[in-house]
């Protein structure tokens, strides 16, 4: 079964930027794009559908979807696009869409208006519980942001893609995270920046030079060992492995600076409450300007 790239829309700048990013990603992957707008205003049996409080959000949803489809068809004429209104609350609608999607793309820090789809709390709850990769895109993100500037420092889509950065945790299962990151770099013909944060355990006190060197060497070996099978699987991807001393939630924000895309893992939650993404993912989502992909793993 072909899984589409799905983008959630509410008409906000964030959601429109997310739809545009999703369209480009769908083209890269040779997949269809599905646009969805969730709202609860239409009764299942069609009764009272002519009331103003029903017609207004219905008209808003149709206008948002139709406008986005028209714009994306003009920009990406070779892309197959489907659009649908979904009669559900935003959070369960997004999670249901994610189940059958290759990836779900939503606006970061979007706002919810009449019949709105995305709000900060909805986005974070979706990220925390989705079983498929979720991409968060900020308002203003354009195709040129994925590329390096040209020789004159101007924005361009004719230059090479910026690096794909991935936050690596050698102490956790990260196959799904690395597979996504390597594939994303391959699709863009971009280098992959694999960043790993290491630190001296507090229980060791103040380590000497030899102790610090030993710990760093062990971190280098662990990172190289994790990356080795993926280098073999994706031989065309140029990999830059980098170590950064400090807590991951702090140093990885700097380590991913200037990248066009950031990939980070998120442990699957087995409970139905809460919207926790973990300290590393939380820091990256709130401080990185580029699109961030959260890949669930066990």
Image: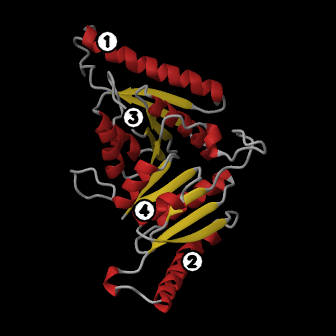
Q: Label 1, label 3: how many angstroms apart (C-alpha)?
A: 23 Å
Q: Label 1, label 2: how many angstroms apart (C-alpha)?
A: 58 Å
Contact? badges 3 and 4 (CB < 8 Å): no
Q: Nearer the viewer, residue 121 or 128?
A: 121
Q: Residues within 10 Å of mark 2 (few under 14, many from 20)?
A: some
Q: Is residue 122 above or below residue 53?
A: below
Nearest-to-viewer mark from 1 and 2: 2
Q: Label 4, label 2: how many angstroms apart (C-alpha)?
A: 22 Å
- From the top left corner, tell me how far across and down residue 44 is, in percent: 25, 22
Q: Label 3, label 4: how many angstroms apart (C-alpha)?
A: 25 Å
> Relative to residue 115, is residue 228 drawn left or right?
right
| Labels 2 and 3: the sequence-earlier one | 3
- According to the image, label 3 marks what residue? 110
Contact? badges 1 and 3 (CB < 8 Å): no
Q: Nearer the viewer, residue 168 or 234?
A: 168
- According to the image, label 2 marks what residue? 224
- According to the image, label 4 marks what residue? 250
Nearest-to-viewer mark from 2 and 3: 3
- According to the image, label 1 marks what residue? 55
Contact? badges 2 and 3 (CB < 8 Å): no
- From the top left corner, tell me how far across and down residue 101 is, in percent: 45, 44
> Relative to residue 58, is residue 4 drawn left or right?
right
Can residue 49 be seen here? The reply is no
Nearest-to-viewer mark from 1 and 3: 3
User: What kind of colouring is applied to the model shown?
Assistant: secondary structure
Indicate the secondary structure of the residue bearing disc 3: loop
């Amino acid at each position: 079964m072909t899984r589409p790239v799905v983008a959630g829309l509410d008409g906000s700048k964030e959601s429109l930027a997310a739809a545009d990013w999703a369209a480009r990603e769908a083209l890269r992957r040779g997949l269809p794009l599905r646009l969805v707008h969730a709202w609860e205003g239409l009764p299942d049996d069609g009764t009272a559908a002519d009331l103003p409080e029903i017609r207004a959000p219905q008209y808003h949803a149709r206008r948002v979807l139709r406008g986005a489809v028209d714009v994306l068809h003009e920009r990406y004429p070779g892309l197959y696009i489907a659009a649908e209104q979904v009669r559900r609350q935003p959070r369960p609608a997004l999670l249901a869409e994610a189940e059958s999607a290759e990836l779900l793309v939503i606006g970061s820090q979007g706002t919810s208006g009449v019949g709105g789809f995305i709000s900060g709390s909805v986005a974070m709850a979706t990220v925390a519980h989705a079983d498929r990769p979720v991409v968060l895109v900020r308002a203003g993100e354009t195709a040129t942001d994925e590329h390096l500037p040209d020789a004159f420092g101007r924005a361009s889509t004719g230059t090479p893609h910026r690096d794909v950065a991935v936050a690596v945790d050698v102490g956790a299962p990260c196959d799904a995270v690395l597979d996504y990151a390597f594939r994303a770099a391959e699709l863009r013909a971009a280098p992959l920046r694999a960043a790993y944060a290491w630190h001296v355990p507090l229980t060791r006190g103040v380590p000497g030079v030899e102790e610090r060197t030993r710990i760093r060497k062990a971190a280098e070996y662990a990172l190289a060992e994790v990356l080795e099978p993926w280098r073999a699987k994706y031989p065309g991807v140029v990999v830059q492995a980098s170590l950064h001393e400090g807590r991951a939630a702090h140093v990885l924000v700097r380590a991913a600076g200037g990248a066009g895309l950031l990939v980070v893992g998120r442990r699957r939650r087995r409970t139905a409450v809460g919207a926790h993404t973990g300290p590393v993912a939380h820091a990256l989502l709130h401080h990185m300007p580029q699109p961030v992909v959260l890949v669930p793993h066990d």
